[in-house]
Image: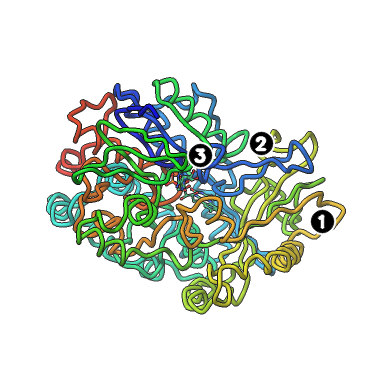
Amino acid sequence: MAEEVYDGIIVGGGHNGLILQAYLARAGLRTLMVEKNPHVGGGLATVEDNLHPGFRHNIHAAFLHGLSAMPWYRDLELEQHGVRTVQPDLNVALIQQSGRTLRWYLDLNRTCASIAEFSKKDAETWRHITEEYGEMVEKIVEPELAAPPLPREEKRALLERSALGLKYLEIEALSPREFIENHFDNVAVRALLLHLCVIRELDVHAPNQGGVIPSFIAARTRAELAVGGSAAVAQGLRKAVEAAGGEIWEGQTIRAITVELGVATGIQLADGRQVKARAFVASNLNPHQTLQELVGMDRLNPMTRVGLRSYLYQIVGPLFGVHLSLNEPPRYTARTTHPDLDQAFLTILGLESPEQIYGLQARFRKGEPASRKVIWGTTPTAFDPSQAPAGKHTAFMWEKVPYLLTGRAENWDQAKLPRIGEILEYWRAFAPNLTESAILRRLAYSPLDTERHLPNMARGDPGVGWLGVEQRGINRPFPGMPPYQTGIAGLYLCGACTHPGGNITGLPGYNAARIIAEDLHLAPWWHPSDLETLWGSLP
Ligand SMILES: Cc1cc2nc3c(=O)[nH]c(=O)nc-3n(C[C@H](O)[C@H](O)[C@H](O)COP(=O)(O)OP(=O)(O)OC[C@H]3O[C@@H](n4cnc5c(N)ncnc54)[C@H](O)[C@@H]3O)c2cc1C
């Protein structure tokens, strides 16, 4: 069988792999992406209800934080490739069982007015953080995510030179929980911020993440929704890859990454075909899939083997999702006092106190669900009618659940139906119009379904790896290993298991493209940020 040869091969077609491929294809390399599913995109997945055509469900990522402000969104000209996003004004709404609501708008004054209904002091603190920390978020927190991580001592030395950097180092040492408890008094405000950490796959107890909360509050960007569904972003990335000459093979299973004399030289497909890579292989998969399954433990160096053995997935990561095809949108009882709740984007139901979040780790370790349910989701068709037939709607709610349900992930297959019923019943307590006659179809996805669809998300972890100190920044995925490298020459990691981690940020792929370009002595056609210069000149 004739061998095919490319400069670079990308294993797995998540958004990170697509971004990496688009950059390197545009830099002049002949690239191939191989994806096992029928469509690229990974977590950017929109599926049509097969019984009710025209209802489109975003079964994984739906809240795209600051998407249109990402450097790759601009560089890869995604809008010219058909991508459109909406940034809803009432961006986050917490509806409590009593009907009280905490509302976070694009407009700071309206947000503070809502917080003041819970605590005047917390509303002032919120305003203060927005005003005081904006520069820090813009010049330190966000650039750090969009650049390969620096060694800790180097980072500290650079930041210690400025007042802004020193202030950042002081808060960075804290865990999100500590930052929240140090700054906010009200339980609803605290719970909301903690919940945002949890749904972005952060460990609220892990130190060295104190910059996270100011970055939520003071960021200039908010959650966005992709018009046409999240898969439309993947299609835009695909067009960017193809416009640059990159090739994509879908529905193809990879059996192995070939390594010869310690160098990655290509891949082998399940049908026996070999595809050669002259310069690099980059994997969008998790470290266990990439190194243990596709390369083989016997080919790894001792440091990588140790790193693999200790690499952890997030216990409070997995999600159970219920997606509805609807005759009418959910109408929350709380809209009688706040009619704009019909247009709330991230809608959280039943979050009353921080204890609901603090208790999750311990319960999930025992395979038990949360003691008091919190669900969150949205009605995409409230912002983008194209995701359902005319006059109809889609809506979904997610809940954090343990991966091992009473000891076994397989238990999810039997537990799915009753779980859908429980979530619906809970949802109806807030939106009583969700009666049987309003619902045309209900689809549900357990953590086990997520793992089957996207094995990269091992143990159903959407973030593809815990974000504790040992697996953050320069330590991600393995302490002691240069970022995006694997210990095998020419083999790179570019997915959510690398800095800065999971979610639809595209930054792991963006940063990995820079590292590979540097290793191949390719001058980047884009303008990656330079932390040394930026942080060296802070006020
Ligand atoms: C239910 C759910 C809800 C989520 N909601 C949000 C949200 O609202 N906002 C947000 O920002 N993030 C959300 N996430 C997280 C987000 O989807 C992920 O963090 C993100 O998709 C990771 O991107 P990635 O490119 O690194 O990997 P992935 O998206 O996992 O892509 C990896 C790709 O590799 C492919 N693959 C796997 N194994 C192989 C193989 N052996 N051979 C070839 N291909 C292979 C997979 O099919 C997949 O296409 C959610 C995740 C889940 C599960």
* Residue at mark 3: C-beta within 8 A of ligand 1: yes
Report the amino acid beneath label 2: Asp
Please identify the quadrant where the N terminus is shown.
top left
Disc 1 is placed on an element classified as: loop
Please identify the quadrant where the C terminus is shown.
top left
Crowdedness near tag 1: few (<14), some (14–19) or many (≥20) residues, C-alpha within 10 Å: some
Work out how far the residue at label 1 is from the one at label 3, CA to CA, in angstroms: 34 Å
Find residue 208 and report its horizontal and vertical position in percent: 29, 63
Q: Kindly identify the residue that appears in the image at 87 percent across and 53 percent down.
A: 437
Residue that mark 3 sits on: 41
Residue 480 visible: yes
Find residue 426 and report its horizontal and vertical position in percent: 72, 66
Report the amino acid beneath label 1: Asn
Q: Which residue lies furthest to the front in this view?
A: 1
Disc 2 is placed on an element classified as: loop
As drawn, is 58 to the left or to the right of 461?
right
As drawn, is 537 to the left or to the right of 377?
left
Residue that mark 1 sits on: 433
Of label 2 and label 1, which has the lower sequence position?
A: 2
Mark 2 vs mark 3, foreground winner is 3
Report the amino acid beneath label 3: Gly
Residue that mark 2 sits on: 384
For this rendering, which residue is in front, 37 or 539? Answer: 37
* Residue at mark 1: C-beta within 8 A of ligand 1: no
Of label 2 and label 3, which has the lower sequence position?
A: 3
Find residue 506 and report its horizontal and vertical position in percent: 40, 41
Of label 1 and label 3, which has the lower sequence position?
A: 3
Work out how far the residue at label 2 is from the one at label 3, CA to CA, in angstroms: 20 Å
